[in-house]
Image (cartoon, helix red, strand yellow):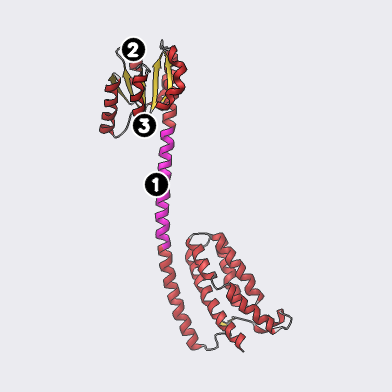
Amino acid sequence: MDIIEKISVFSSKLTIQYIHSDSPALDINRMLDLKRLFSKVYVSSHLENGWQDYHKIFVETKKYPDIIITDIALQKKNMNIFQKIFQENKNQVIIAISDFSEKEFLANYIDVGIAYMMLKPLELAQFNNVIYRASEFVFHRKWDQKRLQQRDREVELLKKELKEMRSDLNYSMEIIEDLMNKALIENNKANTASCDSIENISLIDHDDGITRMGGDEELYKELLEGFCQYYKDTAVKMKQALEEMNFDELASLAHGVKGASGNISAKYLFDIAKELETTAREEGSKFRLFFLIVKFKKAFNELCSCVDKIIKN
């Protein structure tokens, strides 16, 4: 691959504006090289015309030239226009063709966007090297910007999809909760002793709980009361964790209440919390998790109603 082909890899999709003085530094061969290398070459004579053409290019194409190359003398009177260009477009890359006497001032020229320099008399190797470096820089910067823009679009799309998913899941949870409320009402009508069991599983094994406390019933009552107070907001936290797709937090909440349920001999709630934890750690069905959270909430409320009766007796 020769140097022209190497440059073309980066320059072929870029545009360049050549602003020349009364004595152009680029001869016919270098101009032909630019036309071979870049997708579009704009030519302007004198700096004032170059400034006007710069705006005209943007109006017509909605884009600034990717690179400006100029042999205009880098004198103070010309710096104002270069400054205007750079202020208008901070990404503008300018290549200056200058003589040796101006090299020491390059540090100051960077502030007006002059990032590359070709020294007179202009040699082909130097010309190719500077055009290559400038094109490579602009190409990668534009590519990085496109990737960032694409990433931003993808993030916004994911946010939209997640919002819609949460809306659908919340709606589903409302349906599930409504159905379970109706089922519990019917269950309570049919079974006034709902403190004893749900789905044939004991809400509280009172005797086992007292045994765990070494026969101290008052201590057991204190533990039951503390359990209901401490975990009263757990169902809300679980729902929030699921809406945020924070499965680790959901599993942690379920794990905590599972252990506490076991300590008070609340078998039914223990089983629900255990399944919730397992399903959350496996990042299982969102609808199943919603169902389990609603089931947990209802079981917890039933359990704490029973606790109130136990404490009062």
Q: Is residue 157 magenta?
A: yes
Q: Is residue 95 magenta?
A: no
Could one spot residue 129 in this view of the protein? no
- Disc 2 to disc 3, C-alpha distance: 30 Å
Q: Quadrant of the C terminus?
A: bottom right
230 left or right of 150?
A: right
Q: For mark 1, what is the residue?
A: 153
Task: Give me the residue at 46% from left, 80% from top.
Answer: 183
Secondary structure type for disc 1: helix
Secondary structure type for disc 3: helix
The picture places residue 174, in percent across and down from the top left corner, at 42, 71
Q: Determine contact: label 2, label 1, CB under 8 Å.
A: no
The picture places residue 159, in percent across and down from the top left corner, at 42, 54
Q: Quadrant of residue 126?
A: top left
Secondary structure type for disc 2: loop
The part of the chain drawn in magenta is 141-166
Height in image: 233 above or below 86?
A: below
Q: For mark 3, what is the residue?
A: 87
Q: For mark 2, what is the residue?
A: 27
Query: What amino acid is labelled 1 in the image?
Result: Arg
The earlier-in-sequence mark between 2 and 3 is: 2
The picture places residue 142, in percent across and down from the top left corner, at 41, 34
The earlier-in-sequence mark between 3 and 1 is: 3
10 Å crowding of disc 1: few (<14), some (14-19), many (20+) = few
The picture places residue 77, in percent across and down from the top left corner, at 34, 20
Could one spot residue 97 in this view of the protein? yes
Task: Give me the residue at 37% from left, 19% from top.
Answer: 76
Task: Give me the residue at 66% from left, 75% from top.
Answer: 263
Comparing marks 3 and 1, which lies closer to the viewer?
Answer: 3
Query: What amino acid is labelled 3 in the image?
Result: Gln
Comparing marks 2 and 3, which lies closer to the viewer?
Answer: 3
